[in-house]
Image (cartoon, grey):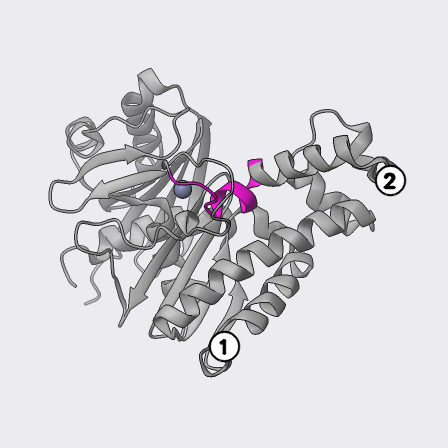
Amino acid sequence: MTTPQTNFIGISVSGTRARAALVNENGLVGETKVREIAPKTLIPQLAEMVQELQSSGLQVSAIGVAIPGLVNRQTDRVVAPRDFSTTIVEDLHGELTRATGLRVEIENDANAAAYGEYKVGAGRGARNLFYMMIGNGIGGAIILDGKLWTGASGFAGEVGHITIDAEGLECVCGNTGCLETVASAPSIVRRARERLNRDGTSSLSRLALNKSFTAEDVAHQANEGDDFALMMIERTGKYIGTGVASVINLLNIERIVLGGGVMDAGTLILNPIIQEVKRRAFQPCFEATEIVAAKLGLDGAPIGAAMLARDAHTV
Ligand SMILES: [Zn+2]
C-alpha cells in the first residue's frame, strides 16, 4: 500500500505582491496564484490564496512563507521587514496559523530561495553553498551540510551589507557604501541616471529616451547591444564580484548560486562577476568554487519555503 502524497503551500511576499504555489513533497510546483496585496488585508488575502489552492482537494500539510525581512527563529516573529513598502505584520506566523488552521513556517526570502535552489535548482548536488538574491535589495544565505546556517539569532548571510565603498552612500541599514547601495536594482537605475546627467556621450544610449527606465530596461538594452547599458551592467557585475570574492575567501564554499531579478541579464552580468571574483579572491578558494546562476526564478522562494515547511520537523 502506498501512502498518499502530501503537499505544501509555499508563499513569497515581495513588495506589494504575493506568489503562492502548491508544491508536492518532491519540490514540484503545481498550481500557482499571484496577487497584488494591500498591507492592511495581508492576512485575509494570503488565507484566501491558501484556500483556493486547497480547493483542488489535495492534502496540504503545512504552509511556508518567504518574506523580505528578518525572522527570529526562536520566537517566529518578524523583526525587521526589509521592504518598507509592505507592512509584514510582526506576528505573521500566529495570525496566518489562526486564519488557515495549518502549520506555518516563516523564513527570510533569501534563505527560502537558497533552500529551494539547494533542493531542486542550481544548488543540487552541492553539500555547501552560498546563495545571493540580487533584486530590489540584496540578501544572502548559507547552507552548510544540507542545513540553512542562520547564525546566532537567525540573521546570517546579509551579504548586501558588506561594505564595498567606505566613502559611499548611506544605506538603509545605517552603514555607508554597502553592496546594496551600488548593485541592487534601484541602485543600478540611480547610477545610470547620474551618469546620463553627467556625461554627454551617454545620451546616445536608448535609455536617455526613457525617463522612467528600470533595471530591467538597462538589462534589456544591454542585450540589444547598447554600449552604455552594457557598461552599467558590467560595472554592476564588478561590484557583485567584489562581494562574492569576500564570501569565497571567508567560507571556501563549494558553490555560489546567484539569483534575483538583476541576474536576468544572464551571461552579460555573470561573466563580469566571475572575472572580478577571479581577480580578487584567494586563488585556491576561487578554483574550488563553482559560480552559477539560479535556476528557479520567481518560483525559488515559494518552493524553498514549502520545502522548509516539509523539513521543519524532520531535520
Ligand atoms: Zn547596508
Query: Residue 83 occupies which quadrant of the picture?
Result: top left
Give the Cα distance between marks 1 and 2. 37 Å
> Where is ligand 1, by quadrant?
top left
Foreground mark, 1 or 2?
2
Q: What is the quadrant of residue 114 in the picture?
A: bottom left
On the picture, is 81 further left or further right than 237? Answer: left
Question: Residue at 45% of width from left, 48% of height from top?
Answer: 299
Residue identified by numbered label 2:
201
Residue 254 relative to residue 71: left or right: right
* Residue 2 x/y as whole percent: 22, 66
Q: Which of 69 and 49 is in front in this view?
A: 69
The residue positioned 30% from the left and 31% from the top of the image is 51
What residue occupies the far top of the structure in this picture? 40
Q: What residue type is labelled 2?
A: Thr
Q: Is residue 78 above or below residue 288?
A: above
| Residue 165 rendering spot, x and y as whole percentages | 51, 49
Q: Inspect the image, locate mark 1, and give the three-letter code of the amino acid beneath it.
A: Phe
- How packed mark 2 is, by other alpha carbons closer than 10 Å (few <14, some 14-19, many 20 or more), is few
Q: Can residue 122 be seen in this view?
A: no
Answer with mark 1 or mark 2, whichever residue precedes in sequence: 2
> Is residue 176 a member of the stretch shown in magenta?
yes
Instruction: Read off the magenta span.
Output: 175-186
Residue 13 in sight from this viewpoint: yes
Under tag 1, what secondary structure? helix
Which residue is labeled 1 in the image?
286
x%, y% of residue 100? Answer: 20, 31
